[in-house]
Image (cartoon, grey):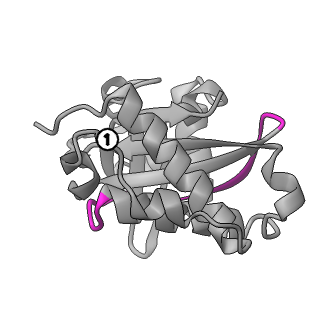
Amino acid sequence: MVKKISEDEGRFLLKLARKSILQEFGNNGNELLSTIPELSRDFLNQNRGVFVSLHQRGELRGCIGIIEPLKSLYEGTIDNAKHAAFHDTRFRPLSLEELDDIKIEVSVLSSPEQLEYKEAKDLISKIRPDIDGVIIKKNNHSATFLPQVWKQLENPESFLRQLCMKAGLPPDEWKMGDLIVSTYQVQFFEED
């Protein structure tokens, strides 16, 4: 079992994400990136899945992450903050003027676990709204929604329909029973 991240550690990840974005504008973000506070420094070296989301006036402004624990939390937070700000193809790159209006959220993921199910009703009964992030895969198509998406799509059927469309699949593909479905949980931290 992976140790939970403390509130102080979460606040550090938020500062790390913001400074990483600032650094891309040529502002000095190096002081935070080169000095790690007296936290349990081991948490930054854990390989974890991590997403960084940017919100502007309550609306999504960028979200990029990695599901699998392929990078350290430190590297993943830096890389995903920059990608969310400048390389999320759904949005134009963030401008320096917008940065003051942006709230950052960092989500640290547990390792995904494949969900065994037989049919659509069984799938619905095993997915836990507000708790589970969901990954679907079929052939070359895949997509995920973080658990926070349940706030917009509270109904499991709507959640799965939208997730199928995000993956480029027909909206009712989840009813066919042949998707590979995995779930994960997150600890997320957001700026005030």
* Amino acid on which the number 1 mark rests in the picture: Tyr
Q: Can the viewer see residue 88 in this picture?
A: yes
In the displayed structure image, the side of residue 142 where residue 109 appears, left or right: left
Q: Is residue 65 magenta?
A: yes
Residue sitting at 53 percent across and 66 percent down? 30
**Quadrant in the rendering for residue 159:** top right
Residue sitting at 82 percent across and 69 percent down? 92
Q: Is residue 75 magenta?
A: no
Give the vertical position of 131 relative to 79 (above or below): above
Q: Residue 58: where, in percent of width, then height? A: 78, 34
Q: Classify the position of the C terminus by image quarter.
A: top right
Secondary structure at badge 1 equals strand
Q: Between 149 and 69, which is closer to the camera in this rendering?
A: 69
Give the vertical position of 84 relative to 151 (above or below): below
Q: Residue 17: where, in percent of width, then height? A: 55, 54
Q: Between 16 and 166, which is closer to the camera in this rendering?
A: 16
Residue with the mark numbered 1 = 184
Q: Residue 67: where, in percent of width, then height? A: 36, 57
Give the vertical position of 164 relative to 28 (above or below): above
Q: Which residues are magenta?
A: 57-72
- Number of numbered labels in the structure image: 1
